[in-house]
Image: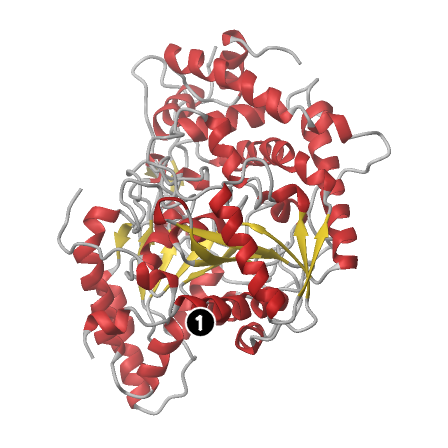
Amino acid sequence: MTSRDIIRRSAAAQAAALEAGEVSSEELTRAHLDRIADVDGDLGAFLHVNTDEALTTARDVDSRRAAGEELHGLAGVPIAVKDVVVTEGQPTTAGSKILEGWIPPYDATLVQKLRAAGLPILGKTNMDEFAMGSSTESSAYGPTRNPWDRDRIPGGSGGGSAAAVGAYEAPLAIGTDTGGSIRQPGAVTGTVGVKPTYGSVSRYGLIAMASSLDQAGPVTRTVEDAALLHELIAGHDPHDSTSLPDPVGAYTQAARGKDVKGLRIGVIEELEGEGFAPEVRARFTESLDQLERAGAEIVRVACPNFRYALGAYYLIMPSEASSNLAKFDGMRFGLRVVPEDHPTAENVMKATRGAGFGDEVKRRILLGTYALSAGYYDAYYGSAQKVRTLVQRDFSAAFEQVDVLASPTSPTVAFRLGEKVDDPMAMYMNDIATIPANLAGTPGISVPSGLAEDGLPAGIQFLAPARADERLYRVGGALEALLEDAWGGPLLATAPELTAGATR
Amino acid sequence: MPSIGRDDVARLADLARIQLTEEEIARFAGEFDSIMDAVASVSEVATEDVPATSHPLAMTNVLREDVVETTLTQEQALAGAPEAQDGRFAVPQILGEE
């Protein structure tokens, strides 16, 4: 088996190969590290590659397996982690200059779980600064490029994680989704992205952007892989006061069922019309046709308040971000810039934050400061929290009629680098379909739906009620199987080959 | 909808403790008006009879047993500090500001 063959397998298939002794974790990890060395100079998916530690973990897993120890099902399968998740002893920057060189003294809970299960951590993936963006262009360390077309964005803010998985640099990755940052990059790179129910995966050790919206989740190439990773990272965590006390669901079993007979799927009327590209809508309709032929019932559902979700999100998110990012003040960690004139604490804070934050972060902190300021609080932040109630009511009413909701994940395929960088509202519109789930705390999955304009991938999104994540895997796994039958294999297999050794 | 001008942006930057260049202030002032126009639609439906939701899922208070747990050591807590002295964070002068 060549290294090209093994890295193109799903994580589940790689785990099976490890279990069968066809390959060692060291060989598997080295194959992915070689792939990163070959193609990442051009892609920019990784900010930090963790070679020594990944190989040490891999060798440890191999020894334990050889000794007959019972291991986690994914033990020895490597993974990439978005750089907003803290990793003890490994750099964590959240894509920002203000944290350049920072080495966290502890692990996020989900990282502890990855380490305990024996997954070699390949490195930290690129992202929009503090997860603010839809294109990975706001990273202080340069953009990530889309493996399908390197002149295009890989989505954001988790473009690094999605590109790493799409380019076979890692079979699994961790992302975070505040307004769609797992699902939208999944859609535009032809990968699978899941935002779990809010609170079902611990946020302890995630550098917070908007605490009531942020949620970590899996980025993978198959629905089954997402389910396997989701089961590993989910569960109650006493370190996170918003962590749900619920047991972890049987996601993998649901993903493998591939049966949608009798499942009622609601098409959200407000999320398929104006603003959605014709070929993205065409792939969406074809996907629904496949599911209908397999026995699902398709009905149209109105969610009239979703049209206000984007506005509410762009008030709530900056407000929470302005508070969360107050800790980056040059006092206890990270960058400190000392001005020559009057280097008082206040002036050091201003100089540090002025030099350490990029445009998008400054823009959102200022917006949040404005929305929370005296005189405007009720009109902006207070009103946005009311819209949140209305969006939740829309979801509740819809889920009385259907089991899951569906829409295209992103209104368009990947746009060109630089195309929207000077137009914040145009950039924000990318999240129009994904944001309602964050406001309501409901889970969502994006699954590849086919190729649209310019031969680039599009995604279909399914949303389920809070705590009903199994339904996402049921419908996602079934659609994936139906479409791959129709296409003759995974969509990613049709992506252009990346040139080894290319550099930007 | 009040217009957000350069003075407003400069004031917000001061409140948020972010030093901005004149060019940044001018650019953000232009952008903020269009962003706030776009988000103003929320007030159309946010009527008095709608309660606000601050959190996506119903929360209950979380308590644990009152037992001592491991925390970061002093050395770990100071490891990322820009400057430390005598086991403490060394910060710039905080008294005597204007």
Q: Amino acid at mark 1?
A: Asp
Q: Residues within 10 Å of mark 1 (few under 14, many from 20)?
A: few
Toward the left, the furthest residue is A501
A27 shown above or below B31: below
Question: Residue at 44% across / 54% down in the picture?
Answer: A175
Could you say which quadrant of the image residue A420 lies in?
top left
Q: Which residue is mark 1?
A: A485
Screen quadrant of the N terminus of chain B: top right
- Mark 1 lies on a secondary structure that is helix
Question: Residue at 37% across / 53% down in the picture?
Answer: A161
Q: Position of residue A305 (x, y in %)?
A: 72, 39
Chain at tag 1:
A
**Left or right position of A398 against A173:** right
**Left or right position of A455 against A364:** left
Q: Position of residue B54 (x, y in %)?
A: 70, 41
**Left or right position of A154 against B6:** left
Question: Residue at 42% across / 67% down in the picture?
Answer: A114
Question: Residue at 29% across / 69% down in the picture?
Answer: A8
Q: Position of residue A179 (x, y in %)?
A: 54, 43
Between residues A403 and A55, which one lies in front from this camera angle?
Answer: A403
Q: Position of residue A338 (x, y in %)?
A: 32, 23
Is residue A153 in view from this perspective?
yes
Asked which colour scheme the image uses, the reply is secondary structure
